[in-house]
Amino acid sequence: MNAPSTPADAQSPGVTPAAGASPVMAQFFDAKARQPDALVFFRMGDFYELFFEDAQKAAAALGITLTARGQHGGEPIPMAGVPAHAMEAYLAKLVRAGFKVALCEQMEDPAEAKKRGSKSVVRREVVRVVTPGTLTEDGLLDARGANRLAAIAVRAGAAAVASVELSTGEVECLATSVGGLGSALAALGPSEVLVPDRLFSDEAVNAALKSVGGFVQPLPQALAEPSASEARLKRLYGVDTLDGFGQLSGAEIAALGLIAAHLETTQAGKLPALSAPRRAGEADVMAIDPATRASLEIEKSTSGARDGSLLAAIDRTVTAPGARLLAARLARPLLDPVAIDARLDTVAWFCEHRVQRQRLREQLKGVGDMARALSRLALGRGGPRDLGTLRDGLCAAESILGLFAQTHDPLVEPPAEIAASLGALHLDLHPELLAFRDLLARGLSAELPALARDGGFVAEGVRPELDQARALRDDSRRVIAQLEARLVAESGVALKIRHNAVLGYFVEATAKAAEPLMTAPLNATFIHRQTLANQVRFTTVELAELDAKIAQAAGRALGIEVETFEAWRSAAVEVALPLQAAAEAAARLDVGSGLAEWAEDAGAVRPEVDRSTAFEAEQARHPVVEAAVRRAGDAYTPNDCRLDGAGASGPRLAIVTGPNMAGKSTFLRQNALLAVLAQAGCFVPAKRLRLGVVDRLFSRVGAGDDLARGRSTFMLEMVETAAILTQATPRSLVILDEIGRGTATYDGLAIAWACAEALHETNRARALFATHYHELAVLEDRLAFAANLSLRAKEWNGDLIFLHEAGPGPADRSYGVQVAKLAGVPPPVVARAKSVLERLEREAGAPAHLEDLPLFAAAAAAEEVASGPSLVEEALKGLDLDGMSPREAMDALYRLRGLL
């Protein structure tokens, strides 16, 4: 949920920023005025301080102490603070709570400020605004998960979703319809969504945003105007024209422009290293709505954790970028059989070359997260360890190439995806990348600090002047040790030479031992500096001179190292594009080899993917459930499933019946997941799978409610069913479980019957329809391409045994009482249930002869009385009122009058 924003002039009741503020508070008010809806982290020495209402909000969210210091406008100033060294942990809590945080940093050393006058304050500026979608620090990110910033825009009835993964520089853009926004956003799983404020009046947009969740950031509609968006996009990429990005639509430019505007604001003018926008359309990826994605537990289990999901079950990647790429592929399965086969070729090649696969996986462990390291360096947040990640990754790339060269068979070329990846890793083909690798290999030391200001990361021999400064610094330190030994010998006092930031180097002795140093003749050598409770501190002329030399040498050495770091950082940005390509290539190799590893472990096979409407699975298994069953030491029962939208090789609609707990829901989900895996380019856990590409996947499995939006379990079920019946196409795959169970028996049966008919005759989609309404079994004889399928169970000595086998034909009963017994319902209740059931079965008549219902009579009647929207209403819905010129508006009015 978004945190409420606070205007700059509402920091505290009665507070007027301009009224008598001190110079430091004037700086704070200036920063707050620039970022009124953010909490301002105001740097003061070793702490970030928050003031007024910012302090009150932060103290409540973080559980830190709220104090008051000084006054403003006659009122105490509320204040809270966090240590600078622990800032990331507090920042993470605030961002997760939905707050934006503006970092106002000290831009100069206090000594520099004093040169302008004794009362001058340190210059401060907002260097960054932290939001959920703009995180780049490792400590704030999930290494194996993406952190995307998305934006949506609608122009002339067309919609677009743009996204950027700021931590890696990956930019994507998807042209879609307003109705497709939910599926597009669910596939991206953004941490933050930018939305023009005008779109909040659109019910379809609101529904899409609510279904996806996450932090929603409203922006002024003016930021989405095409001309302004195009100008910002050109500035972001440093180009004069956008033609190189393809024919971007107005909606795509507006969505990308919103991201550019947000980055300009939050990154304070720093330009990230971004790749060119990767474009896609609805016709390129399988549409999976948020409800289906949650039901199938593709990326997260129902608990919200990664464990228990399809992704966790098949992930064998050894690098963080590989794990993110695998998640992206599962989230957006492809529709083009040629592109799918290209991915499958990679997996098949690694399956066939097991030894080479194992060696490659060992080499990939040294690659590191080059994309995120590069992004931090480009934004000025990186350190020497990020340069080390780039160095190690490029060195590993050379080892990977050597590995493939050793085992290369000139008669068998690797698949196209592997060949392209090796090309991106071939440093000889990218001389600028090779030179950069050599620069870092020679220049970086073995042990690297986190921050450039810590020094010690430039290797010896790289900068002669640095070596000289270091020698002077280190030699002086040895002289200090020699001086200490000499002073002890000359004075006969057990003293130590110590150092701190205030006094520099000083001589320290205990109070009792220091007494001779304060009397003649030693007081001529030892000059008193400070007396503490238990120690007394002195200096000498010789020590003061050495202190100055050491300070100068250490400062010069550190200055040279920081200068060198900036040069190397700039060099990294210069080769950003080939670096990003190399990082992506390593991730592709990791995904391909990891999927081969899983396929070997799970006994998965290569699917056949074509443009038919077939679904033919032999001895298929649920990848997540099977893994859990195997861990428990049990065997998983595989099952066949055959569907065909054309009705040629199997039924279009399968009515699935069987007892509770027999495995109907698992069977349904299992077949849906096979389609996801196959079209994502993965092998599948089955003996064989032939799949005609699925354009849209729908799942209505499991019970739930949405009380926050006033929806009961049954209402939510009907809403999701309505979405399926209005959007499914002949190429879709639909799995429905117990439609109509949440209402009266005959109402539910009637709804289930009508839905089954509609799926078969109107949508013509491949569908698995699980139900306990055994009356639906007659549809096998009434519909041309319908069949019955049941999960088997047997009674043995009064107990129910589940076989988990799917076979043709309907189930004879649901065995609900037996399942109640297995669940531990008290025996008297079970016995009473049996008695009632037997009586009901004896007395039940045939109140409704369903077999006598005329097929689609209800649909025909509905068509007669239907009163849909008029032509004028339809035309009005299609008008883009904000995007029309006055002349276009006048023409539209004349068209509407003509329609009347």
Image (cartoon, helix red, strand yellow):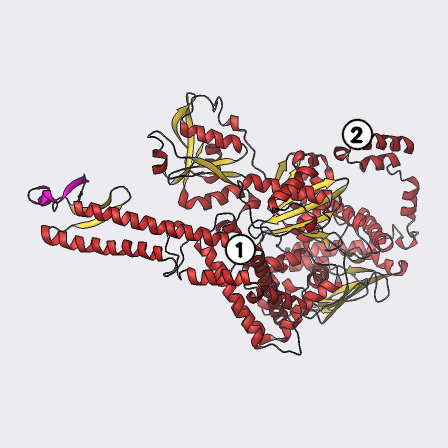
Give the magenta-colored segment's residue range: 513-535
> Magenta segment: does it hold 533?
yes
Task: Check whether the beta carbons of the residues at disc 2 and disc 1 lie within 8 A of each other.
Answer: no
Which residue lies under the disc numbered 1? 143
Would you say 439 lies left or right of 465 here? right
> Measuring 92% from the left and 48% from the top, which residue is drawn there?
857
> Measuring 47% from the left and 32% from the top, which residue is drawn there?
56
Q: How busy is the neighbourhood of tag 1: few (under 14 within 10 Å), some, or many (20 plus)? A: some
- Name the secondary structure under disc 2: helix
> Measuring 55% from the left and 33% from the top, which residue is drawn there?
37
Q: Which of 413 and 546 is in front in this view?
A: 546
Q: How busy is the neighbourhood of tag 2: few (under 14 within 10 Å), some, or many (20 plus)? A: few
Q: Nearer the viewer, residue 865 or 574?
A: 574
Can you give x and y, in whole percent of width and height, for residue 665 in the image?
71, 58
- Name the secondary structure under disc 1: loop
In the displayed structure, 897 sits above or below 378; it is: above
Q: In which quarter of the image is the N terminus?
A: top right
Residue type at tag 1: Ala
Can you give x and y, in whole percent of width and height, for residue 485 in the image?
15, 55
Report which quarter residue 350 is drawn in: bottom right
Residue type at tag 2: Pro
Q: Which label belongs to residue 886?
A: 2
Give the alpha-carbon distance from disc 2 to disc 1, as whole Å: 51 Å
Can you give x and y, in whole percent of width and height, for residue 681 in the image?
68, 64
